[in-house]
Image (cartoon, grey):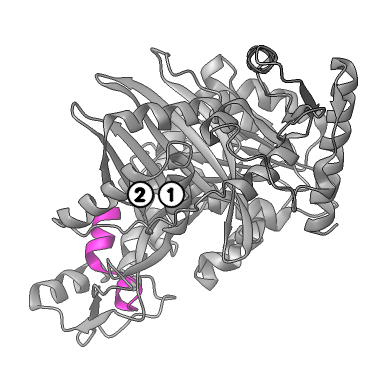
């Protein structure tokens, strides 16, 4: 159905509802569709602010024998209708009211008092020490109308590709910051009265309380239209009470199911073949590990999307659900409300799924339940907090203990980081100094033989170049991934065949069997000109 038809149907529904309401109220109904583009309202009868405030228009100025006629809406206060009637009757005038639809009222008022659409400047991100840009953006945001400021802020964050908006209360002002490509940037300092407006918009849309003395979580959606295209933006809202009011963080999920694709993640062909081989099996566990904001969820969802075929039953347990995917059963688990992933997982296994995703393994009960599921004919995917794949395996043994039965359950552990990608249009090649060259040579000296090693005596590096079109010299982010395939040698640690289960020893065995570490993967990406060594060192 085209947009015009949708609008016509909405208008028809509004007119029918207004006609029914008029019959109930016992006043005449007026369909303004035939006259609203040509009617001239009675002049000098009501002031424009009064017409806006009371949702009422003067249709005809009366004379001898003809009453004064007004168009009222369902939102016109009854007290004002009584007041107007009394005022006109007291000087001998007859007065008549017609009920018109809210749509009709808006069309008439848009002709009579057209809204001036203010186009505000786009937000610019300040570089370090650039207070002029922050001042300029602050002035823009402080000038945006009360009913627009929240939408404008979210729209601009989406335009900039921000993953988070941070709203923070200071003693004298409110600070807005945005996280772009993993880095937090100051955007604006706003007047304190903006705080009430923004928090009010958050409260009504994300269903949170403005008076709460406790941390809260909420969720909202916003339709964004840009350059003629529309997409749905999901926002996760977290608030916490502070000394000067509630601080809020809005996490933006610009969801497009086509983005959840393993091909888009730039995974090395050898590691990609390992993932494909392991998830093609009907049982076993795959763990994604890394800190918050390392892209674990996106990789897990991409694997789920690849497995999402009509012959598989896929169920997820999530806290909260970040992306909605057609064709899979997604179950929200509110762990703050006392529910646990283990409890949910036991219920889910009765539904005979082929693939189960558990949002996060946080305790021994969930770990044991997930592993039991993985050895009884289910493919189980989950995330886990650890710094590396070997550290994750060591932590898992701490959680579940040495257990020969579980030794073949975990098939693959993927540790992941996100680093900023250099802007190919502006990046600059340079010759590294001798100490950097030696550091790289030392870091890559044990690179497995199946990895093509660059010439470590002549390699070049790249650095970001800041331009107007590329204010940081970076554009987007890339995945750095370390994959530990749990083979026979690694399984020995879980069986109890190896007495020492320290992270370093597990990593040594995995490296002997061909694992490439996060640091090695990161340095190789820097040598290819995809990122910088500084980015790698910060992330890894």
Horizontal side of 74 relative to 128 (left or right) equals right
Q: Position of residue 405 (x, y in %)?
A: 61, 33
Let me know if residue 533 is in the magenta part.
yes
Where's the N terminus, which quadrant? Answer: bottom right
Q: Residue furthest front?
A: 64
Question: In this image, 253 relative to 291: left or right?
Answer: right
Q: Between residue 160 and residue 407, name the one nearer to us.
A: 160
User: Image quarter for residue 330?
Assistant: top right
Within 10 angstroms of label 2, few (less than 14), some, or many (20 or more) residues? some
Asked if labels 1 and 2 touch by Cβ distance under 8 angstroms, the answer is: yes
Name the main secondary structure of what is drawn in magenta.
Answer: helix
Q: Secondary structure at mark 2?
A: strand
Query: Residue at image x 82%, y 46%?
Result: 33
Query: Residue under circle 2?
Result: 179
Q: Residue at x 26, y 69 (%)?
A: 532
- Tag 1 residue: 163
In the rendered image, residue 215 lying in the magenta stretch gets the answer: no
Q: Nearer the viewer, residue 115 or 26?
A: 26
Residue at the spot 61% in from the left edge and 47% down from the top edge: 112
Q: Which mark is residue 432?
A: none
Residue 360 appearing in the image: no
Q: Secondary structure under badge 1? A: strand
Residue 94 image position (x, y, % from top left):
76, 20
Residue 177: x and y in percent read 31, 44
The quadrant where residue 190 appears: top left
Please state the extent of the stretch shown in magenta in the rendering: 526-540
> In the picture shown, does residue 525 fall above or below 356?
below
Depth check, front residue: 302 or 126: 126
- Asked which quadrant contains residue 474, the reply is bottom left
């Amino acid at each position: 159905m085209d947009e015009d038809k949708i609008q016509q149907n909405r208008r028809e529904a509004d007119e029918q509802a207004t006609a029914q309401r008029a019959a109930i109220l016992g006043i005449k109904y007026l369909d303004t569709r035939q006259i609203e583009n040509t009617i001239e309202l009675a002049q000098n009868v009501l002031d424009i602010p009064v017409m806006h405030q009371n949702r009422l228009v003067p249709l005809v100025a009366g004379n001898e024998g003809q009453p004064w006629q007004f168009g009222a809406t369902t939102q016109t206060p009854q007290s004002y209708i009584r007041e107007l009637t009394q005022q006109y009757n007291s000087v001998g005038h007859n007065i008549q009211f017609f009920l018109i639809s809210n749509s009709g009222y808006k069309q008439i008022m848009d002709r009579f008092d057209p809204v001036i659409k203010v186009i505000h400047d786009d937000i610019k991100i300040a570089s370090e020490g650039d207070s002029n840009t922050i001042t300029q953006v602050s002035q823009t945001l402080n000038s945006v109308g009360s009913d627009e400021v929240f939408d404008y802020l979210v729209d601009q964050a989406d335009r900039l590709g921000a993953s988070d908006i941070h709203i923070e209360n200071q003693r004298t002002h409110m600070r807005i910051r945005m996280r772009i490509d993993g880095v937090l940037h100051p955007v604006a300092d706003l007047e304190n009265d903006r705080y009430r407006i923004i928090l009010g918009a958050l409260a009504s849309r994300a269903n949170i309380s403005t008076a709460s003395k406790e941390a809260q979580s909420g969720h909202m959606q916003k339709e964004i239209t840009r350059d003629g295209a529309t997409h749905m933006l999901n926002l996760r809202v977290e608030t916490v009470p502070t000394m000067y009011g509630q601080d809020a963080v809005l996490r933006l999920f610009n969801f497009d199911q086509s983005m959840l694709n393993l091909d888009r993640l730039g995974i090395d062909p050898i590691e990609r073949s390992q993932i494909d081989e392991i998830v093609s099996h009907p049982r076993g566990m795959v763990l994604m590990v890394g800190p918050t904001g390392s892209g674990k969820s996106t990789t897990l969802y991409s694997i789920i999307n690849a497995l999402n075929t009509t012959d598989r039953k896929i169920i997820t347990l999530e806290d909260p659900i970040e992306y909605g995917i057609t064709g899979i059963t997604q179950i929200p688990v509110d762990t703050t409300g006392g529910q646990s992933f283990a409890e949910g997982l036991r219920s889910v296994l009765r539904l005979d799924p082929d693939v189960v995703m558990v949002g996060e393994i946080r305790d021994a009960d969930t770990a044991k339940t997930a592993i039991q599921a993985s050895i009884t004919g289910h493919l189980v995917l989950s995330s886990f907090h650890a710094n590396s794949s070997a550290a994750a395996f060591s932590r898992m043994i701490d959680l579940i203990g040495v257990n020969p039965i579980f030794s073949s359950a975990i098939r693959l552990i993927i540790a992941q980081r996100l680093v900023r990608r250099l802007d190919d249009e502006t990046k600059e090649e340079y010759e590294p100094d001798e100490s950097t060259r030696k550091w790289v040579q030392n870091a890559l000296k044990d690179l497995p033989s199946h990895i093509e090693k660059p010439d470590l005596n002549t390699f070049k590096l790249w650095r970001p170049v800041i331009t107007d079109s590329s204010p940081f010299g970076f554009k987007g982010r890339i995945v750095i991934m370390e994959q530990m395939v749990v083979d026979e040698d690694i399984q020995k640690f879980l069986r109890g065949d190896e007495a020492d289960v320290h992270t370093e020893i597990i990593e040594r065995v995995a490296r002997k069997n061909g694992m490439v570490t996060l640091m090695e993967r990161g340095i190789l990406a820097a040598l290819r000109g995809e990122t910088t060594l500084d980015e790698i060192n910060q992330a890894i």
